[in-house]
Amino acid sequence: MHIVQVVLDAPIDKYFDYRYQPSSGGEGMPLVGQLVTVPFGRRTAVGLVVGTGDASDVPPENLKDAGYCFQEIPPLGKAWLDLCRFAASYYHRTLGEVALSVLPKMVRQGKQKAIGKALAALAQEQKKESPVPVDMPVLNASQQQAVETILHAEGFFPVLLYGVTGSGKTEVYLRAVAEKLRQSPDAQVLLMVPEINLTPQLEARVRARFPAEDIAVLHSRLSEGQRLRNWLAAVTGTARIILGTRLSVMVPAPNLALIVVDEEHAPSYKQQEGLRYSARDLSVWRANYLKIPVVLGSATPSLESWHHVQTGRYRQMALPERAMEHASYPAVSLIDTSKEPIVDGLTQPLVEAVRRRLAKGEVSLLFLNRRGFAPVITCNACGWVSQCHRCSAYMVYHKAGRLLRCHHCGLARIVPRHCPDCGNLDLQALGRGTQRIEENIRQQFPEARVLRIDADSTSRKGSLQKALEDIYQGKVDIVIGTQMVAKGHDFQNLTLVGVLDPDTALFSHDYRAGERLFSQLMQVAGRAGRSVAGPDANPAQVMIQTRYPGHPLYQAMCQRRYDAYVGELMEERRIAGFPPFGYQALLTAEAKSIDKAMAFLQGAKGLIDRQQGITVSDAIPMAVMRVANVERAQLLLESASRPALQGVLSDWLPKLKGLKTSVKWQVEIDPLSI
Ligand code: ADP
Ligand code: ZN
Ligand code: ZN
């Protein structure tokens, strides 16, 4: 009797035994790491083979037959299985949940025909033309040193590549990739980026540099067919370059020789639903397991990675200069809004600076991380505010269509003609969003070509691409945008960045808000002066409007000294015992009433019987307590020791899973915000 042991995408932490009857076709037994279809309950599921044998503890009459074994897909390999095992134990999920959930949908659903067709098509694909040499810049000394350090590394070798936008990090990645691919005919490299749709230029650059390579792009916007094809290309080794977002960290590539994580600090490396993993952390684990180098690149590294450099675990390589000729860093200056009044969002010095750009045909970018026209409307007579009745949040005023929209639950309604409470006709829009700035700018500069880029202006498919094209083609004078414009784009002729209202982040309940603001400001500042019009162009300049020009964040920003600000943040974190000096796990609960959610969490807290080495907070409502009529609360576990925290979780979570409750709960390890 042939027995296969499989894991399934289920929260049950066990191996399931099935009988396997090789078909008359004579195919052999399934191997560990292969996929089989099996009957599970009333449905047919796809399982991952984790063991084979000739006996089972299950009585023969209860033993069911496995179905089809996908022997056309190579076994997914021990290294990949161990990665899944690690992720499962660290994030407290079952192996089956992890392993199956990271497969392309068509594989997970056992779409035999589609898989067969995709594999056949892959085999048919012509090997591409032999590489046409492309122009490559001569590396500067820092780049050269970084590349050599990465390539001469033996075994596990994490490098933090620290350099601002334009310092030539990508060029370093590409050289290291090229050399790894040259060294071995089956070597594969994994290149991770935070958000692929915002960095189409990188994909184009990689394709241009490696014209002969099959590049497997992996991200969530692909069609299922494309994702299947690219995943199979990685698994079979056809693709030697894998370029993807966070989900690509789990791709079963059999011959990885190098991993690169660009913008390693980016919050989008953290999966925020389902299996809440950190792709950056898993990539480091994976490199360690495989004994290969991993390059983490950033202008504003996470404090976690910075700390690893300070403690000697990672090697830091800095790229201190802008790589391209004729590109300089913009000067950063602060506009003190206690002295310069803000009129409709803008101070006079900023307006004048925009005017100077217009006069020379240069581009200005105004950055405001708040979309809509105004964040709230209110009644001057009775104090009514546009509260969302489903969320603990205000509804944002959108002028087009005269709508109030909740940015948490999506609810929209027409702006009332008069106050719903007192009937007063005089409703006022408080504060400013991008739409209001756009209106103001159009009034001040009627001759200018103005373009707003935010989630509202780009909601139609292709509209972001179109907007960016317009900027590239010089059809825009003034861009107004949210963080969507901060990333990656290489705008020509842009010499001014104005930052309108960054101060709110200084007083956020989120202890990472400062770090994030600094990184956003560096990113958006990096848009200025990348390629400058000519010798008599305005100097590239960043102007930040703030009430707190003395704040260490802005002071460090002016000197472009992230390290100065990090020093400050590190000290705060050390005193508070926050990451990277402490480890956290967050239990969140969702229920119809806040009392119920809180009671569940207090009860859950009572089930922790071994509290040595950890501290457990009281249950508290979440910062935005109610979203779409669901009330949310949280309980925080902290420890200075990762093993102590993991030990408690391993004891405690099985007990929680045993509870019968209507409360929806989940636990997140290393939460980004608490
Ligand atoms: P980053 O990834 O740090 O933003 P890039 O690698 O994209 O930096 O480099 C910024 C620009 O400078 C790109 O246009 C790139 O082609 C160019 N560049 C990079 N290295 C050099 C170099 N050594 N000499 C000249 N140009 C370079
Ligand atoms: Zn009123
Ligand atoms: Zn809402």
Image (cartoon, helix red, strand yellow):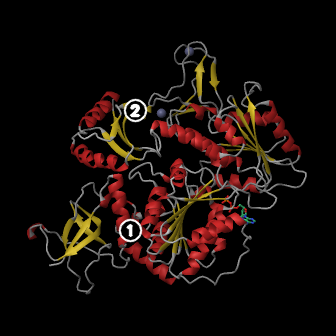
Q: Rate crowding at label 1 as few (under 14), some (14 to 19) or many (20 or more) other CA atoms within 10 Å.
A: some
Q: Residue at x 34, y 31 (%)?
A: 618
Residue of label 2: 629
Q: Is residue 116 left or right of residue 565?
A: left
Image vertical order of residue 372 relative to residue 184, above or below: above
Mark toward the start of the polypeptide (1 vs 2): 1
Whether ligand 3 has any atom under 8 Å from the Cβ at mark 2 is answered as: no
* Residue type, label 1: Trp
Task: Classify residue 212 as left or right of residue 122.
Answer: right
Judge the density around disc 2: few (<14), some (14-19), many (≥20) Cα neighbours within 10 Å. some
Q: Amino acid at mark 2?
A: Asn
Mark nearest the camera among 1 and 2 is: 1
Q: Is residue 585 visible?
A: yes
Q: In the image, 342: left or right of 399?
A: right
Work out which quarter of the rendered image holds the N terminus and state it.
Answer: bottom left
> Which quadrant would the C terminus be assigned to in this image?
top left
Disc 1 residue: CB within 8 Å of ligand 1: no
Residue 200 quadrant: bottom right
Q: Nearer the viewer, residue 165 or 220?
A: 165
Secondary element type, mark 1: helix
Image coords of residue 492 (percent x, y): 78, 55
Where is residue 41 shown, x and y percent of the image? 20, 59
Quarter-wise, where is residue 316 in the image? bottom right
Residue 248 in the image: above or below residue 638: below
According to the picture, the residue beneath numbered tag 1 turns out to be: 80
Residue at 80% across, 61% down = 325
> Where does the image place residue 641, in percent across and percent down from the top left?
37, 47
